[in-house]
Image (spheres, helix red, strand yellow):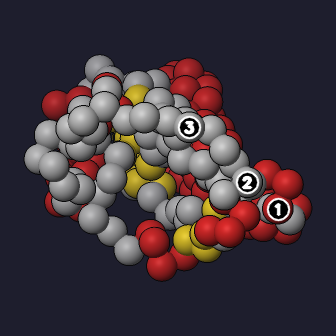
Amino acid sequence: MDIVFANAGINGKVAPIEDITPEEWDQTLEINLKGAFLTTKYAIPHMKKKGGSIILTSSINGNRKFSGFGMSAYSASKAGQMAFGKMAALELSNYNIRVNIICPGSIDTNIGKNTFKEENNLRKINIPIKYPEGNQPLTGKPGKPEQVAELVYFLGSDAASHISGTEIYIDGASTLF
């Protein structure tokens, strides 16, 4: 085993903190954070001899963008993946196992199918935000899964042999506004 890509995740319940049940919180953290942990944990014995690359999918949410109201469980899980990835990179460096974290922004995927927004309850969060005009990724539309795949391919290749413990944002500069 040379490359591991821990990419599973859900948005989970999108609601104010007071309206998220402990079970809904746990579900999001179990899939997103514990899933990355277990994938990494069980890959290590297969990678120790030859080394390799582990790539975790985190997100701009929880690391660079904090305006997704109702996304506290998702953001906490993604911030946890970032910390976990950096600790794993340090711990596994003696085995020549690199660990990096990609942080996509808006990518054209089907993650919305497992997103459960509570629109009425989200109105409780009354924080007025005015976004600057043009707050869109460089292309004005979501990125493509193929663009993320190319980044993963690079991080898994020998061309990235000196990159570890690094987060890479792939969001078309949308979080720089």
Left or right of 37 in this view: 133: left
Check residue 124 in the rendering and tell me which mark sits there, or answer none. 2
Establish if 77 lies above or below 95.
below
Eyeballing the image, is 26 above or below 83?
A: below
Residue closest to the eye, 71 or 144: 71
Cα–Cα span, label 2 and label 3: 12 Å
Where is residue 154, by image quadrant?
top left
In the picture shown, does residue 87 fall above or below 103? above
Residue 40 place in picture, x, y as percent: 57, 49
Residue 139 image offset from top left, x and y in percent: 11, 47
Q: Amino acid at mark 2?
A: Lys
Q: Do the numbered discs 2 and 1 sit on residues whose CB atoms are within 8 Å?
A: yes
Q: Amino acid at mark 1?
A: Asp
| Residue 128 image label | 3
The location of residue 11, given as percent across then percent down, is 56, 62
- Relative to residue 70, is residue 161 drawn left or right? left
Q: Amino acid at mark 3?
A: Pro
SS class, disc 1: helix
Give residue 19's mark: 1
